[in-house]
Image (spheres, rainbow, N blue to C red):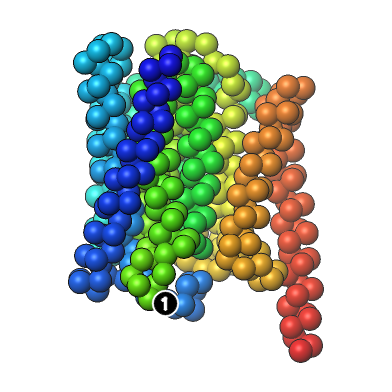
Amino acid sequence: MDIYVFWMVGVFVLSAACGFVFIPVILNFCKAKHLYDMPNARKVHKNAVPRLGGIAFMPSMFISFAVALAAINSTHKLISINIWSFYFLIGILLVYVTGIVDDVLGLSARVKFAVQMVAACLLPLANLYLNDFYGFMGIHGVPYAVGLPLTVLAIVFIDNAVNLIDGIDGLAASLSIVAFAGFAYIFAVQGIWSYAILISGIIGVLLAFLYFNLFGDVSRNRKIFMGDAGSLTLGFILGVLCVKYSMNNDSVILLRRFDFIVPFTLLVVPVFDAVRVSVVRISHGVSPFKADKRHIHHKLMRAGLSQHGALACIVSLAVAYIALNLALLQVMANTFVFFIDVLVYVVFNLILNRFVRLREAACGRC
């Protein structure tokens, strides 16, 4: 175990170092090619900012993981790559390349959705799918014919939820770090070291990205956004990790030490926000894929918070959900925990709406 923890830390450091090397190169490339995310009425930022930061994620993650894998297997021969990991890799590459093309050339929502569907289908085709709800809503075993579309729906929805919440500096990256840290702990405790080490690499490069995203100086060409290459890739990986941990298969996880709902708890804020925004858009006769300013970060800023203030509030909410659910799962079934989560989110939004109305009314009197 000690050698694996050592390599988790090593991969984290190496991936972060790669991020600090790759991101400045990407910034210079964007400046030379004039590849910027331009401000408009819907967006929060006021300056043209390079948007290809997500390109650094995959190389940093896989270089650090490959180094660790080679080093561990040269001495211990204890980590192997199975068929699920192979399909996982293909799916990531499909989504990653699609994100890059969208950031550089632009793609329609339908094309991106189609690629997400294809990538998500790879997991159940490799026989990795949601096959048990562990008593959630009274449901236990799930047949393949039902589990396959549910798996695809879950991965695609989580992928888009992460992509949609990438609206202010640091938000998608910070929420992803919280979720990945949770998954790293879950998989490490379960002894699934290949995934724990890989996840450590993702966290490393995300911290490097956050440095440039949150504290980079636009005037010195040191600020960058992750773009769809980043947010779609992160969302896909998180969706797959949820499915992997949730599947009832002794060859995947022999003995679960955490409830089925815990992985989804790690993503509750972006998922609930995506559901709420989609419902609001549909109720107004608008496509759920149409971008607007209805997300939770927009509401917090309308209530008077700065970008960094909204970021801190949302990340705190995500951490609070994790603590709440871990406590509640000790005393009640996961179905009741889910309904409490929904209730908390509804109350939070009602209170937030009240603050927004009060502030807008006060501004109207100015």
Q: Please say if 107 is above or below 74.
A: below
Marker count (numbered): 1
Residue 138 to residue 354: above or below: above
- Residue at position x 73%, y 28% from top? 327
Residue identified by numbered label 1: 47
- Residue sitting at x 20%, y 71%: 33
Which residue ends up furthest to the bottom in the rendered image? 366
The answer to whether 163 is drawn above or below residue 145 in the figure is below
Left or right? Give the position of 101 relative to 226.
left
Q: Position of residue 302 (x, y in %)?
A: 66, 71
Counting from the top left corner in percent of width and height, residue 173 is at: 47, 50
Give x and y (percent) for residue 203: 43, 40
**Direction from residue 261 to residue 14 in the image, left or right:** left
Query: Residue placed at 61% from the left, 22% from the top?
Result: 259
Task: Categorize mark 1 by other alpha carbons within 10 Å: few (<14), some (14-19), many (20+).
Answer: few
Give whichever of 112, 200 is nearer the camera.
200
Residue 294 visible to the viewer: no
Which type of secondary structure does the marked residue at label 1 adopt? Answer: loop
The residue lying at 36 percent from left, 66 percent from top is 222
Image quadrant in which the C terminus is located: bottom right
In this view, the residue in front, 314 or 41, is 314
Q: Report x, y in % for residue 359.
A: 75, 75
Frontmost residue, 151 versus 143 = 151
